Image (cartoon, helix red, strand yellow):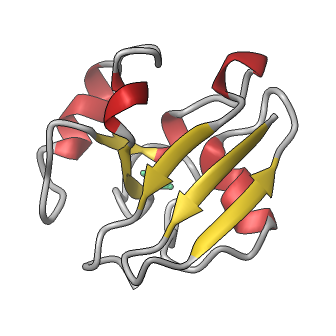
Amino acid sequence: PRFTIIEHTGAEHQVEADVGQSVMQGAIDALVPGILADCGGSCSCATCHCYVDESWASRLPPPEATEREMLECVVEPRETSRLACQLRVTPAIDGLVIRLPASQV
Ligand code: FES
C-alpha cells in the first residue's frame, strides 16, 4: 500500500510500505523528516504525531486508550490527530494522506 505524507512546509512524500508495518515505520524507512519516533513505536513519546486527512479520519480504526492518552500531550492537537506508530499499514489505507505538525522537526 502507498500513502502520502505532507510536511508542514508542503513537501510531499509518497511512501510505499508493507502490510503489517506501522505508518511511522514506513515513513522512517522512506527517510521522511518530521516523524521523530523517539520511543521506537511503543506509543510513549508522541513524536510521531500526525494529522490524518479529514476524508480519512473516520475510515481508520479509532485510537485505543493508550494512544488517546498520548494525544492529550501533543503540541497543536486537532480532531484528526493520530500517532503514526499506532496506524497499521493494511490494504485499506492505500491512498491515505497525512500531514505533519510544524512543531515536530
Ligand atoms: Fe513514540 Fe509513536 S513513535 S509514540
Front residue of 48/11: it is 11
Q: Quadrant of the N terminus?
A: top right
Q: Is residue 69 above or below residue 105?
A: above
Q: Quadrant of residue 49?
A: bottom left
> For this view, does 40 lie left or right of residue 62?
right
Q: Position of residue 73 (x, y in %)?
A: 14, 54
Residue drawn at (73%, 22%), measured in percent from left and top? 90
Front residue of 16/84: it is 16
Q: Is residue 41 above or below residue 20?
A: below
Residue drawn at (54%, 33%), measured in percent from left and top? 87
Q: Quadrant of residue 58?
A: top left
> For this view, does 92 lie left or right of residue 11?
right
Would you say residue 40 is visible in this rendering?
A: no
Q: Position of residue 16 (x, y in %)?
A: 84, 49
> For this view, does 92 lie left or right of residue 9?
right
Residue drawn at (68%, 45%), measured in percent from left and top? 3
Q: Quadrant of the C terminus?
A: bottom left
Residue drawn at (50%, 60%), measured in percent from left and top? 39
Q: Quadrant of residue 13?
A: bottom right
Front residue of 100/65: it is 100
Would you say residue 23 is visible in this rendering?
A: yes
> For this view, does 72 lie left or right of residue 24?
left
Count the labels in the image. Answer: 0
Q: Position of residue 76 (x, y in %)?
A: 12, 62
